[in-house]
Image (cartoon, grey):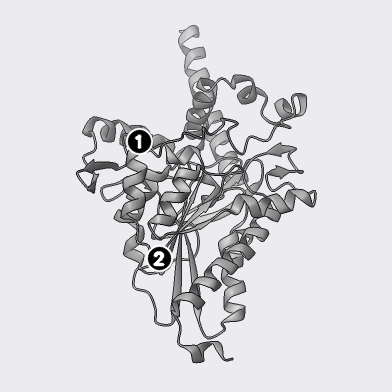
Amino acid sequence: MKTLKQLFLFFISFIAILFLSELFIRVSKIANPSPNEFYNDIGRGRRRDLSYLFFNEGFGIGRFNKYRYIGESCSPNKETNTIRVALLGDSYIEAFQVFERDYFGVIAKKLLESKYPSTKFEFLNFGRSGFDIADMYAYNELFVKNFNPDFIIFFVSNEDLEPKEVDPLLPKVIAEGDSLLISLDFNQQSIDFYRKTNFLTQRFCISQMTINGIKKAQEGSIWAVFFDKFYHWLKPNLTDTSSSSRSISSEYLVHPLTQKIIEQLEANKTIIVNRDSRDLPAAFVKLCLVRGLQYYPLNKKLDSLKRLGIDPNYWHVTNKYGHWNHNAHSFIANEMFAIINKSIENRALLNKNAFLQ
């Protein structure tokens, strides 16, 4: 009986500690529950009306709106005298490292509205961490196009040009002859398993922290999981990991699926931006230009920051390299202003009188 009593007290104490720990983590915002949900129309996506706070190489606070993307909610039905820009890309575009007010899209919006005060500009953040070009294309066709953007900007790196499509809960792009199909034929077992585990990770921060820890340990960074910030003090991360060091062969051939994707994009509204620190393959750039797509080598522009001694990927506060820092977002906002401004003038989207203020 004494042993049973001790086991009972241990169990009660353990549950109480877990409850108090969960309460403390939620109130202090040390960690977040899972930001993901499964949807029939897009597969795995961000949860509606969910606030987040992330501590990473930077510090990000924001909210997923009712339409499941970060930022101000913009209805699919666009207002008159509005120019809407859709931003597609990976974690660099989703940007969990900065506050929404410091995001390059928000800054670019203000710059454009300052020049064209009678026109409303909307920059919609459709970035999704881990996306490659096939994921971006599927997301654009299934979801982004519903918002009727005037411009669709794909931010791609060298790694994004090789479609992986390994996530069983994301749509698959399938080449069929000269056309592309998007498959929403998800494995039901994967859906059922995800929903069972997501019940815990959506409701309990500790569950999500445990899952994240397991993933990091599987990546070989178990000591970073144990020691967290102390690990980086003992072993500073002073290597720029913003891009792979893999060299690009002069005989590079564009992936067949990537080629078909580029051939399907709308030339009159699509802009391809190189967000990598390296040049994209010449064969890929040529393909974009032949298809009539605008191509913008952002990496060349960011090099000018480095020449001024400002590294766009280095975070002084955490002594880490990673995603774009605040200086980079401010710089890129000006580049986006220049791109959209030039496109507006070339396409004459607005009545000439709208510019005369």
Q: Give the residue displayed 32% in from the left and 38% down from the top.
A: 169
Element marked by disc 1: loop
Q: Nearer the viewer, residue 248 or 205?
A: 248
Left or right: where does residue 337 sit relative to residue 251?
right
Q: Nearer the viewer, residue 186 or 240?
A: 240
Q: Is residue 143 above or below residue 117?
A: above
Q: Kindly identify which numbered label has been placed on residue 191.
A: none
Q: Kindly identify which numbered label has been placed on residue 165.
A: 1
| Badge 2: residue crowd in 10 Å (few <14, some 14–19, many ≥20) | some
Q: Position of residue 323 (x, y in %)?
A: 62, 44
- The amino acid type found where label 1 is placed reads Glu
Q: Give the residue displayed 51% in from the left and 51% down from the top.
A: 94
First in sequence, mark 1 or 2: give its number.
1
Left or right: where does residue 175 sit relative to residue 71?
left
Q: Are marks 1 and 2 in contact (CB under 8 Å)?
A: no
Q: Give the residue displayed 68% in from the left and 38% down from the top.
A: 321
Q: Is residue 210 above or below residue 335?
A: above
Circle nearer the viewer, 1 or 2: 2
Q: Quadrant of the N terminus?
A: top left
Q: Position of residue 6 (x, y in %)?
A: 52, 13
Pointer 2 residue: 269
Left or right: where does residue 46 sit relative to residue 193?
right
Q: Position of residue 75 (x, y in %)?
A: 37, 69
